[in-house]
Amino acid sequence: MSSVLRSAVTGVGGYLPADIVTNDELSKVVDTNDAWIVERTGIHARHRAAPDEAASDLAVAAARKALAAAGRTPAEIDLIIVATTTPDLTFPATAAIVQRKLGAPIGIAFDVQAVCSGFVYALSVADGFVARGMSRCALVIGAETMTRLMDWTDRGTCVLFGDGAGAVVLEPVEGKGDATDRGLLGFALRCDGTKQDLLYVDGGPSTTGTVGHLRMHGREVFRHAVVNISEAVRAAAIDAGVELSAIDWFIPHQANQRILAGVAHRLGIEHERVISTVANHANTSAASIPLAWAQAIDDGRIKPGQLLLVEAMGGGLTWGACVIRF
Ligand SMILES: CC(C)(COP(=O)(O)OP(=O)(O)OC[C@H]1O[C@@H](n2cnc3c(N)ncnc32)[C@H](O)[C@@H]1OP(=O)(O)O)[C@@H](O)C(=O)NCCC(=O)NCCS
């Protein structure tokens, strides 16, 4: 069989800001309570970036951990893709700021905007460089300061989100072209722009000239999430040539414990195979998958060689899934 180039994940790292905000603390800001938040979302706490901490700072901290795990240095990085909805500035791309702060050499750096699906989208974009031999060492980062987009008078949204960053290093490896290969094996990416009004931010540079606040029809988003994600997961598994029963770990976007459970139930995935960090991270948008991945490596659950399936859904609406042999 002829050999093919695959994008292998050689390091994973996560970073959470020090400040932890509990549900009880939020109940002093809006009319809510710990019992309601835990029952409806599974969230107990979230991290919040310090006033002088930008998305790029979170990204750099996660990237350094991922690079250390891969045994790589910033000098070796030739591609940086940051998935973020909360960039430091309207421009330049947060990826360019990360490149400068890491001291990485001139290379390719840009952002991907697919909201909570951003990390899955960014992986697929990076695969287009790495598996074509155009990048020898790529950083894919999800980095968010979602707390900065909250309307702190809207109890239906402000309790759901947190800040953080996660990063992976991708490097080319030779494979046989089948599902035993190491690396990114299959994708499914989707967007339905007609569902924009269900989840969006009501500001932007070319409309209001402001950053805006996050707006959401939670119940509708919930309904679409379970149906849409399940379809994309099945499609990614087919693209990779694997059965869902062969997946060692599902790493969902961490939006709501009830969505995680609903998708797993629909797909017949036992909860023992699902990585869940939503209780302590809340929804960190594009950062949630690599953050959960890093945590499950650190606690010894995820090991090299295992088959992983990551999936997400977010504003757009966007959604998608990717199968990876780690
Ligand atoms: C947001 C979400 C938790 C709300 O749960 P829900 O069961 O759909 O609740 P509803 O929005 O219908 O609201 C039910 C009641 O709870 C109230 N409520 C909403 N937020 C509340 C809060 N933080 N604390 C207390 N009560 C709250 C509502 O005002 C409403 O009260 P009412 O019946 O008196 O009008 C749920 O819809 C959800 O998780 N959706 C998906 C959100 C998501 O993950 N988005 C990101 C995707 S990337």
Image: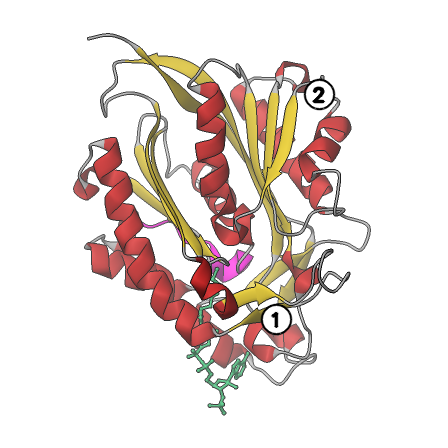
- Residue range (magenta): 274-282
The x, y position of residue 100, in whole percent, is 76, 27
Q: Residue at x 19, y 8 (%)?
A: 1
Mark found first going from the N terminus, 1 or 2? 2
Q: Is residue 253 above or below residue 209?
A: above
In the rendered image, the quadrant that contains the C terminus is top left
The x, y position of residue 114, in whole percent, is 52, 49
Residue 311 can be seen in this image: no
Q: Is residue 98 above or below residue 143?
A: above
The x, y position of residue 212, in whole percent, is 70, 65
Q: CA distance from mark 1 to mark 2?
A: 36 Å
Q: Is mark 1 within 8 Å of ligand 1?
A: yes
Amino acid carrying label 1: it is Cys
Q: Residue at x 21, y 38 (%)?
A: 238
Label 2: element kind? loop
111 or 246: which is nearer to us? 111
Residue 260 can be seen in this image: yes
Q: Is residue 55 left or right of residue 5?
A: right
Amino acid carrying label 2: it is Ala
The crowd level at tag 1 (other Cα within 10 Å; few <14, some 14-19, many 20+) is: many
Q: Which mark is residue 158?
A: 1
Q: Is residue 89 left or right of residue 244?
A: right
Q: Is residue 281 magenta?
A: yes
13 or 286: which is nearer to us? 286
**Residue 266's image quarter?**
bottom left
Residue holding disc 2: 104
Label 1: element kind? helix
